């Protein structure tokens, strides 16, 4: 284990002792707000300190086993212990590294996935529908709940634009993760190379879609938006839905006047529910705008595009003739495109999460040096 990690972990052990002393003081116990704050910190610190203690114990076990190797009567037992301790130490080091990384508070939140057709006309809209299906299948396999918030369909059955809401959490190689934490790296330009269904001469076409993944904010966040800054329009919904959707002005479009950001929803059964859902999307878009502006200020320090949410960048290519998916940010190439399009996205998602963790770890080391 690197020295800087040992230094950080030693601080956690020291802090655990400090917190236990503070929590035992009578004056702290009388201040409930401070007591709860320290208790939450103690829970987090104790989790890291506990794993660090286990790591140190296994290091001691390994050293003892290595000393026993010279004794012929104990050599076989020592080898077994060396193998066991070495394996567990590697697992513990990975776990501790992950626990030390800064946490994005939005990672546990539900997500809005906005998919928009770009260059390529009808083929781009069909690709947008394929991407929506890919994410839906992936989330279904992970136990996440997916619903369509709004959709603008093309003539051939694709989507000019579709907004999905995804809720829930699951365990990944990076630990427990919410919908936003799993999908936030999907923001950007997605390019497809294939022979369209409408192509009669078998020529390969290149089309593109843009994706934006937004973290849904707490309802309390919506209160921060001044109602006077909103323009709310209602209109008659279009598309499938039978008589109800054709006879009522239930669709809602909300415009945030200071920023010009717009959100709309028409899939709910009432104007009230559509307004509530549109407000959630609007709040998420405003939050993402603030996040992007902050990220732009840090761009000089962080060269990686992972997590930047810049929709103009081409992040990935889907090459159907070669059965190849390439993520250009991390130079990842997988020859299992059809499986991925069916929702088998684990290799892609976990590679991006691992890359971000490595970047964060390197930044942590640089800050300490």
Image (spheres, rainbow, N blue to C red):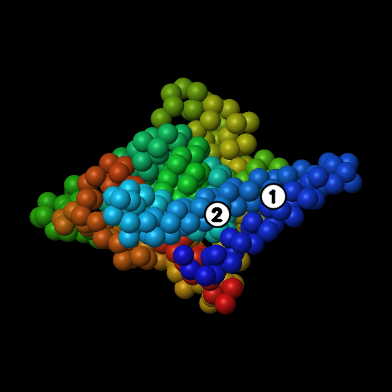
Residue 109, located in which quarter of the rendered image?
A: top right
The answer for how far apart the CA atoms under marks 1 and 2 are is: 17 Å
Residue under pointer 2 = 52
On the image, the x and y values in percent for residue 355 come to: 41, 62
Residue under pointer 1 = 41
On the image, the x and y values in percent for residue 190 come to: 35, 58
Query: The C terminus lies in which quarter of the figure?
Result: bottom right
Q: Nearer the viewer, residue 251 or 195?
A: 195
State whether residue 239 appears in this view: no
Q: Nearer the viewer, residue 136 or 311?
A: 136
Left or right, 341 with respect to 135, comes to left
Which of marks 2 and 1 precedes in the sequence?
1
Q: How many marks?
A: 2
**Image point 69% across, 49% down: which residue?**
41
**Image point 41% across, 66% down: which residue?**
313
Q: Secondary structure at mark 2?
A: helix
Label 2, residues with CA under 10 Å away: few <14, some 14-19, many ≥20:
many
State whether residue 369 appears in this view: yes
Q: Secondary structure at mark 1?
A: helix
On the image, the x and y values in percent for residue 164 come to: 46, 41
């Amino acid at each position: 284990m690197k020295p800087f990690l040992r230094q950080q972990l030693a601080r956690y052990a020291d802090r655990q002792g400090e917190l236990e002393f503070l929590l035992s003081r009578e004056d702290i116990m009388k201040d409930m707000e401070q007591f709860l704050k320290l208790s939450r910190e103690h829970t987090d610190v104790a989790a890291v300190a506990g794993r660090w203690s286990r790591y140190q114990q296994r290091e001691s076990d390994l050293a003892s086993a290595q000393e026993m190797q010279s004794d012929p009567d104990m050599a076989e037992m020592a080898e077994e212990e060396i193998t066991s301790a070495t394996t567990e130490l590697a697992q513990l080091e990975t776990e501790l590294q992950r626990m030390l990384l800064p946490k994005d508070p939005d990672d546990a939140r539900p997500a809005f996935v906005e998919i928009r057709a770009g260059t390529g006309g009808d083929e781009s809209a069909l690709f947008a529908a394929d991407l929506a299906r890919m994410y839906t299948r992936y989330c279904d396999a992970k136990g996440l709940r997916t619903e369509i918030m709004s959709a603008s369909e093309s003539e051939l059955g694709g989507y000019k634009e579709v907004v999905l809401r995804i809720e829930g959490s699951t365990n990944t190689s990076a630990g427990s993760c919410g919908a936003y934490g799993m999908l936030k790296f999907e923001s950007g330009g997605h390019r497809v190379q294939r022979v369209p269904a409408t192509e009669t001469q078998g020529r390969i076409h290149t089309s593109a879609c843009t994706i934006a993944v937004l973290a849904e904010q707490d309802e309390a966040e919506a209160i921060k938006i001044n109602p006077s800054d909103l323009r709310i329009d209602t209109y008659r919904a279009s598309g499938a839905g039978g008589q109800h959707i054709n006879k009522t002005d239930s669709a809602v479009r909300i415009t945030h006047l200071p920023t010009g950001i717009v959100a709309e929803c028409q899939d709910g059964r009432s104007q009230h529910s559509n307004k509530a859902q549109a407000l959630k999307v609007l709040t998420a878009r405003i939050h993402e705008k603030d996040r992007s502006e902050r990220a732009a200020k840090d761009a000089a320090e962080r060269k990686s595009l992972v997590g930047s949410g810049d929709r103009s960048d081409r992040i990935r290519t889907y090459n159907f003739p070669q059965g190849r998916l390439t993520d250009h940010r991390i130079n990842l190439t997988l020859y299992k495109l059809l499986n991925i399009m069916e929702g088998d996205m684990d290799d892609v998602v976990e590679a991006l999460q691992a890359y971000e963790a490595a970047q964060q770890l390197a930044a942590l080391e640089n800050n300490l040096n």
